[in-house]
Amino acid sequence: MIKQILFILLILTGNFTLAQERFPKNQLSINAFRNPSLGLEYHHRQLSIHVGYYLTNFKRAVTTEFLKTGISYWLLPWGKQAIPSSFYIGLSYLRGLTRDYKYQNAIAFEAGARFMVWKGLNFRLGAIALSAEGKSLKVNPTPSINYTIKL
């Protein structure tokens, strides 16, 4: 059993190491919707950092706004484009600007996939779990449209 687990870990480690070569060394994304935020994101191979303005609806027709910054890890690329489609996970810090979250700190975990459509145009579809002191955990979908360029 131990040999099987070690074999599986070796294969996964090898795949992640080889997968890193599929990601361009440096990229810049202009994010035009809420995933990860309205703003900029810098990618270095499998890691990215982002900063921007994030809005979401925890209640129907009630928009809550945040400033958001964080880090994402990209994995399991697919496709033959220069910038591959891939999955991601991320962790972010948010500062509330409006509603019940005004002046409050929050933390969020995100996961999803980026689908490269044409050249640098891409769509993301994911989910975010947002937590703030004194508030219940909120989970929302995070669709987006972005444009990514290799540097």
Image: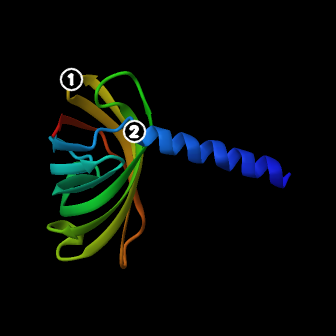
Mark 2, other Cα within 10 Å: few <14 / some 14–19 / many ≥20: few
Tell me which label, 2 or 1, sits earlier in the chain.
2
The amino acid on which the numbered mark 2 sits, given as a three-letter code, is Glu
Residue 133 locus on image (x, y percent) = 36, 78
Kindly state the secondary structure of the residue where label 1 is placed.
loop
The amino acid on which the numbered mark 1 sits, given as a three-letter code, is Lys
Residue 42 locus on image (x, y percent) = 20, 50
State the residue in front, 97 or 83. 83
Q: What residue sits 42% from the left and 65% below the top?
A: 137
Q: 67 above or below 122? A: below
Q: Which residue is mark 1?
A: 119
Q: 135 above or below 124? A: below
Q: What residue sits 40% from the left and 36% below the top?
A: 86
Q: Which mark is residue 21?
A: 2
- The number of numbered badges drawn on the structure is 2
Q: What residue sits 31% from the left and 59% below the top?
A: 71
Q: What residue sits 32% from the left and 46% below the top?
A: 45
Q: CA distance from mark 2 to mark 1?
A: 19 Å
What colour scheme does the image use? rainbow
Q: Quadrant of residue 151?
A: top left
Kindly state the secondary structure of the residue where label 2 is placed.
loop
